[in-house]
Image (tube, coloured by chain):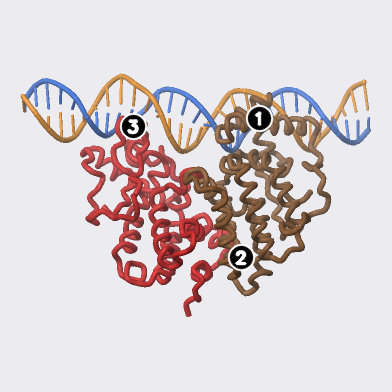
Chain colours: A red, B brown, C blue, D orange
Amino acid sequence: MLYAGFMSAALPPFPKPQEALDAPELLQVGSGTEVDEPCLRADAARNRARLLDAAGRLAAEHGAAALTMEGVAAAASVGKGTVFRRFGDRTGLLAALLDHSERKFQAAILSGPPPLGPGAPPVERLRAFGCALLRRSIDELDLLLAGEPSAERRHTFPPRRFLRSHVALLLREAVPDADTELLSHTLMAYLDAALLHHLTEQCGLPPERVRAGWLDLVARVTRTDPPA
Amino acid sequence: MLYAGFMSAALPPFPKPQEALDAPELLQVGSGTEVDEPCLRADAARNRARLLDAAGRLAAEHGAAALTMEGVAAAASVGKGTVFRRFGDRTGLLAALLDHSERKFQAAILSGPPPLGPGAPPVERLRAFGCALLRRSIDELDLLLAGEPSAERRHTFPPRRFLRSHVALLLREAVPDADTELLSHTLMAYLDAALLHHLTEQCGLPPERVRAGWLDLVARVTRTDPPA
DNA sequence: TTACGATCCGGACCGAGGTCCGTTTAATTT
DNA sequence: AAATTAAACGGACCTCGGTCCGGATCGTAA
């Protein structure tokens, strides 16, 4: 698996909250196949699928914000405990719903065609990264907002860590003598789902302006010229 | 009042969630006196004080994260409904606890001595703003984290709006032909409580480095030279 | 096929945020 | 001082996220 299998599998007795696999760096392990959830028992796998299906339908129908754990359980004809055992908590369930899109995005970054994938100069990759993430986030805004982790966990959430590490990597190439750890947080913050929601849906900014803002921000942060 | 009276007063029947007073721009209304909560009934004012006192004590003792509305009500010898009528919801209560510090900060910006207050060149004010806000936020990190509004409300929360408007104002002076609305969001994001918590408490970065990061960020965003 | 242990299931249970509404009380009017 | 009324009170109540644990099921090994 690429790496994104963050909402792991069987958490032993149950209370054990699934520990994220920490991602040493953005070191992807081989195999981009979809077969994961290592050796889940047959009934467990079936219920997991049912739950994701039900959750997806409910989210599409009533909005992700209206998703309740009990509702999903009921719609999947499964006990409530099962939902929590499988996904840990609400954010875990939402993360699982986003997993597919997450993996695709990570794959595009790690091994897709430039400028998003390897091969282009770092600043160009940064620009592409932001534009691509903006598109994806707007697509999945509902799920992203509903699934946002609590303030304490937000920055340790594996998907976000991965993306931030990637930005930090590119920044190290582009501006070697800056504090790229900190700058990467700044850049990621611009792409934050809550901010995006505020700008596009609450303030009504056109996505194009947000996109332009990203290109400008990258230019300023890297002290380069904006693209023509 | 300065403006910060965001967790207003009497919300008529009760269900009516207190509407924030929207702050046209950062137009402070006269009178910096502490007498606000316009014409609260005697018992209401007494209970409000009791509640804030109890909440403050409990937060100091067990941490703001452990604050429960029922606990505060009990500690103040008051019904639970009273807490919600007065403060709307949990974030409202926490905001009220932060109100004093908030007002002081706003006053320093609007009419305090430079470089935080008026009189210094905009870039210098920006630097001072960030450093001051970093200090304050680290001081109040507990309350800030516990009181963080939900993703949908985060960017419309009056205190944050005020600060962001201020940054946007300074940016308009410093870099007139940039998209200062968007840049102000970027700058504010660097000062976000959750990020600060992550950097200082989860990653163990020294505050000094975070501070340096701010100065560097301001320099990049405004395309100026970092201060000596 | 039976037996057995690990895994999983499900729903009762708990705590906390938030709402409702019948009752009480502070301010005002007569 | 009594009457009036708008506001405040308080706690029962609801919902929902999250936990627990006795019982059912799966996979496996004999």
Q: Are marks 2 and 1 in contact (CB under 8 Å)?
A: no
Q: Chain of mark 2?
A: B
- The three-letter code of the residue at mark 1 reads Arg
Residue appearing at x 68%, y 69% in the figure = B173
Q: CA distance from mark 3 to mark 1?
A: 36 Å
Q: Position of residue D19 (x, y in %)?
A: 41, 29
Q: Chain of mark 1?
A: B
Q: CA distance from mark 3 to mark 2?
A: 47 Å
Labelled disc at residue A61? none
Which residue has dot 3 on it?
A14
- The three-letter code of the residue at mark 2 reads Glu
Residue appearing at x 26%, y 45% in the figure = A37
Q: Chain of mark 3?
A: A
Labelled disc at residue B57? 1
Q: Secondary structure at mark 1?
A: helix
- Write down the quadrant of residue A21 in the picture: top left
Which residue has dot 2 on it?
B181
Q: Are marks 3 and 1 in contact (CB under 8 Å)?
A: no
Q: Secondary structure at mark 3?
A: loop
Using the image, determine if residue B173 lies above or below residue A71. below
